[in-house]
Amino acid sequence: MGTCTYFAKTKPRNWCLIEAMKEYEEFYGIREFEPLCARIEEDLSELENKRKERKNIFQSLVSFDQSHNVKSNAAPVPPHVKAGSKDPNCSPETKQTAPTSMPPVVHKLADNININKLGKQVNNFGNASSNKKRKLGESMDEEDDESSNVYLHSPSRLRATTEDQESHTTQVVEPFDDIHRAAHMPTQLILTHGQKQYTIRTPSQAAKHSPHRPKITKSHREALEEYFVFETTFANTGDDEMRALYEMEQEKQKKNRSLVDLGLFSYVKMVLQDIPHTDFPETLWSQSVDCSNSATMFVKVVKYVMTGFHLLSHSAVYPVTDHERTFFVEYVIPGLMAISKMSDSFDFFWCEYEMQSVKEMDMVDKGFNLMKTQRRYIDALAKMTTGSEMEVVVVEASSGPVGEKVVHTIEDTLKIMECTTASLSAIAAKYRHASITTLKKLRVYSVHLIKNKMTLSYTSLNDAYSWRRMDLRTAEIPTKWLDRIDMIRYFELLATLLDGIQTAVTIERQLRDENVGVRDFQGQTVEEALG
């Protein structure tokens, strides 16, 4: 009897234990579980031995071919290279002509660096792997070099040769070490020891990366850049106007301008620093603040939020659970609820609330087939209380407070962009006879919660074929009373969001007036510009 060929004819990545056992059972007629597993183990061991034999034969052929090429060249072997070994600083093609005094050519990558692992670092340095198959003895061009982004010299030497690089001149650099256990990239060092790799990044990387922020994949970003003008942590498209606006908003965040404009920055700082934990609610609510009507409303927001935070601070251990809804309900909903209840122009709806604009816009594309129509359910959705019921704020929580779920973060980032653009599309369809200039001023906001970090962003219309997407504020919500000073960024975010919603309500009313003809305007209508 022969041998079952399932593992020999099937690629290892396609192996399936159930399929293998069925085929073995039919081939050998073995019905018992243990003998069947023993037979599979025996065949796998035999297959492994055969592959090792083939690998040894292949390596022998490679060694023979390389030694044959070396012997056919007339160049002398350098003194530091043992007889019969390969000079690491010189390829077979250069041995015939290179003089012995010539400085060694820098290898792009040490021989023992795992190329496959380096190939996963696509985000910063490009893909270092290559699937091109090469025949024995075939030379490799520079553009085909699998390690074209990896160097054996330090970033300090890279900086020292900046002028030479800018003038397109080439400077030969000595290898960083002779045992080839370090690979240098522009902003990181990769070290190997045995089969393990260790990465040490330069401090410059910390300034470019902000953890627990909205994110998308490289392929998503490349596709979306045709439809969005981005100024976010995950993408920027180089638009000068958007960049200027983004830098202005970042400067406002640094100075807590939303709180300063309300005249409440000193008050919020006093609440967070000066009122002791004991009898905190009583002291907080007994104080009065002399300020404007809009500021008075936000003072109540601060009091409601801090009262709830004081209550949560009594927990002996936090977090009790990593479930995203627990943190969302206890720490996020109180602030959003407070700004909505202090205003009569919008209201929030909680926990998997269906977004109507996505359904309405997709319904047309699906031929009004409700079974095929896309549905989106939102963690928290703010709708205006006007007749249009515009969906003005989309809130998504992608993880609990302990660990980020990156896949969920990416999905929610895409979901937010889909929902905010759908909301603006629905408004454009409703107010087709209003001014396109007014519509471009309208913003739909989003709040994305990842762990305890919130990112406030907005989407607006750019032109007939693209949208604008910009980050406005970020804040980390503390979970311990000792860290309560971090709440000042959270209140800055809430104040910015409240001001943005109130502005959106005003613009939506202007669109309604223009649409029915009671307010004149110059320029194109929405229908003319987008039609």
Image (cartoon, grey):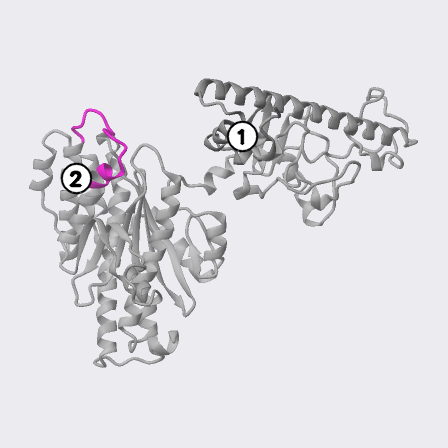
Residue 526: quarter of image: bottom left
Q: Residue furthest right?
A: 74
Q: Say whether residue 321 is magenta.
A: yes
Q: Position of residue 331 (x, y in %)?
A: 21, 39
Inter-mark Cα distance, 2 to 1: 41 Å
Magenta portion: prevailing SS class? loop
Q: Which residues are magenta?
A: 313-329
Q: Position of residue 264 (x, y in %)?
A: 20, 48
Tell me the amino acid under the disc marked 2.
Answer: Met
Give the number of the disc on residue 306: 2
Which mark sits nearer the N-terminus, 2 or 1? 1
Give the number of the disc on residue 2: none
Tell me the amino acid under the disc marked 1.
Answer: Ile
The residue under the point 80% across, 32% down is 90
The tally of labels here is 2
- The N terminus sits in image quarter: top right
